[in-house]
Image (cartoon, rainbow, N blue to C red):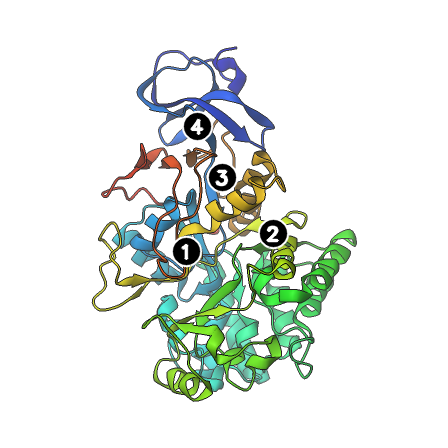
């Protein structure tokens, strides 16, 4: 067959043709040898024997719609480059979000980004501004620096709640992709406020992206079980509730949590889930749930934490108290599951393989030992992060496809198609991604399935993944023949229409 397979007769040459690969596009039900043609930044044809003025070889490779990361705090040039080698073409800050979103979008556009980017309206930043008096500036690091401040973690008065919701309404009107709700970091928040935020999302027809509050199994005195709170909000308000990193907030209780999700889905509620394939998380060391007296709730000890800026294990409770006081926004690694333990590995697998669970990285901002060198490539040893920033998608592919848990097509569905559906809901239909259909944005990853694997470790956290041969964003190469194009900045904003 020729180019008619795309539904369009093509004459002449296209700007770019990706030739000879296995095209895997679950949105169209395609899993077969095909060429992909690109013109003016969009997919122009999918067929055979297509001719292009530039030809990229995909022999032995999978050609798929670029992966979409709904949960990435690595919103810098260096962070984007790491994610590009992980197959990501669109990376979004939706769990924490930003306020003002206009400042976050403007900063990213002015600096230029290799990948597409976007932000939700940040409930946490709104709360910090209203309750603690610190004006938000659209930067994740600024928000992190205030996480340990108890002023924003308390219950809001009715008047304060009105101001928080009013800020969120303004940010949604300014293009925010839904509402990011870090309720797990503000344990004093009333369940009524959470429901009110969900109602705002429902009336605005956007999702919420929630880091849930503690499960009752962790903290019996919590105001409401975090999983129950999220599914109740979905059922009562009709809002699309996205459950962020269900793996790290559920731990060994993941079966119960996913059972709740399944129940409300059967009843008609919209709840989506995501997970990442690591036994350690990362957050600000000043987070409320990392205080020494609360670590035992999760079966943790101070020595299970690594302080990223110095790459050292926390020695004891006294050391932890000092670090939390000196640098409350400093990143830490939290080792909560033992990946070498069969039972813990089964917990991770359950989260990743549950029906329709998406791959999402929770990629962390780069921490620098000394002066930042974000434009340097390869990133120097002075750049530190969690290995999930560089390796989530490749590691998920290696573990899930490599051992037969998922097919290649099912992996692409979870890494691209399903996140695209969430992005479409968040943007009001403004984004056409997650497919190689004619007319879709030409965000494409070409990777060798036998060599697509993560290389980042906790000791070498910025080592890029291997196996991506080409990566195109809006039809422009960011990676070509396995090499990063240093000047590539084709990323465009994804925002609410």
Which residue was labeled with disc 2? 352
Q: Earlier in the sequence, mark 3 or mark 1?
A: 1
Alpha-carbon span between mark 1 and mark 2: 17 Å
Q: Nearer the viewer, mark 2 or mark 4?
A: 2
On the question of residue 187 being in view, the answer is no
Q: Earlier in the sequence, mark 2 or mark 4?
A: 4
Write the residue at 43% across / 28% down: 43
Q: Which mark is residue 43?
A: 4
Looking at the rendered structure, the secondary structure element under dot 1 is helix
Write the residue at 35% across / 50% down: 82
Q: Is residue 62 left or right of residue 13?
A: right
Alpha-carbon span between mark 4 and mark 1: 28 Å
Write the residue at 37% across / 44% down: 85
Alpha-carbon span between mark 2 and mark 4: 30 Å
Q: Which mark is residue 389?
A: 1
Alpha-carbon span between mark 3 and mark 1: 22 Å
Q: Earlier in the sequence, mark 4 or mark 3?
A: 4
């Amino acid at each position: 067959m020729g180019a008619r397979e795309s539904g369009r007769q093509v004459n002449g040459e296209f700007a770019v043709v990706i030739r000879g690969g296995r095209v895997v596009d679950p949105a169209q039900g395609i899993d077969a040898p095909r060429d992909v043609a690109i013109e003016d930044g969009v997919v122009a044809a999918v067929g055979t024997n297509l001719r292009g003025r530039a030809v990229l070889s995909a022999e032995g490779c999978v050609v798929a719609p670029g992966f979409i990361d709904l949960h990435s705090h690595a919103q810098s040039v260096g962070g984007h480059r790491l994610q590009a080698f992980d197959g990501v073409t669109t990376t979004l800050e939706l769990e924490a979000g930003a306020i003002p979103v206009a400042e976050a979008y403007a900063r990213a556009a002015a600096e230029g980004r290799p990948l597409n980017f976007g932000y939700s309206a940040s409930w946490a930043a709104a709360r910090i501004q209203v309750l603690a008096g610190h004006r938000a500036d659209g930067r994740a690091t600024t928000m992190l620096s205030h996480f340990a401040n108890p002023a924003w973690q308390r219950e809001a008065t009715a008047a304060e709640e009105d101001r928080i919701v009013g800020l969120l309404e303004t940010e949604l009107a300014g293009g925010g992709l839904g509402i990011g709700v870090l309720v797990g970091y503000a344990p004093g928040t009333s369940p009524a406020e959470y429901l009110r935020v969900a109602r705002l999302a429902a009336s605005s027809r956007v999702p919420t992206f929630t880091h849930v509050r503690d499960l009752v199994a962790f903290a019996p005195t919590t105001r409401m079980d975090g999983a129950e709170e999220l599914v109740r909000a979905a059922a009562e308000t009709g809002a699309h509730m996205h459950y962020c990193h269900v793996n790290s907030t559920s731990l060994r209780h993941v079966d119960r949590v996913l059972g709740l999700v399944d129940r409300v889905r059967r009843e008609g509620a919209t709840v989506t889930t995501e997970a990442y394939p690591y036994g350690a998380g990362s957050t600000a060391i000043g987070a409320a749930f990392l205080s020494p007296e609360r670590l035992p709730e999760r079966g943790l000890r101070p020595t299970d934490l690594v302080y990223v800026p110095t790459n050292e294990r926390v020695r004891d409770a006294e050391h932890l108290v000092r670090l939390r006081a000196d640098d409350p926004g400093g990143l830490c690694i939290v080792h909560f599951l033992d990946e070498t333990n069969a039972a813990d590995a089964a917990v991770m697998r359950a989260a990743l393989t549950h029906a329709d669970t998406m791959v999402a990285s929770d990629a962390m901002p780069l921490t620098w030992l000394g002066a930042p060198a974000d434009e340097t490539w390869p990133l120097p040893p002075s750049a530190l992060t969690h290995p999930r920033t560089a390796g989530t998608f490749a590691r998920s592919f290696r573990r899930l496809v490599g051992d037969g848990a998922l097919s290649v097509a099912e992996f692409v569905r979870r890494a691209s198609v399903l996140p695209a559906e969430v992005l479409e809901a968040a943007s009001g239909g403004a984004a056409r991604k997650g497919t190689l259909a004619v007319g879709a944005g030409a965000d494409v990853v070409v990777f060798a399935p036998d060599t697509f694997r993560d290389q980042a470790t906790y000791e070498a956290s910025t080592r890029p993944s291997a196996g991506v041969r080409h990566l195109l964003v809006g039809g422009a190469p960011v990676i070509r023949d396995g090499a990063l194009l240093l000047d590539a900045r084709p990323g465009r904003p994804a925002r609410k229409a």
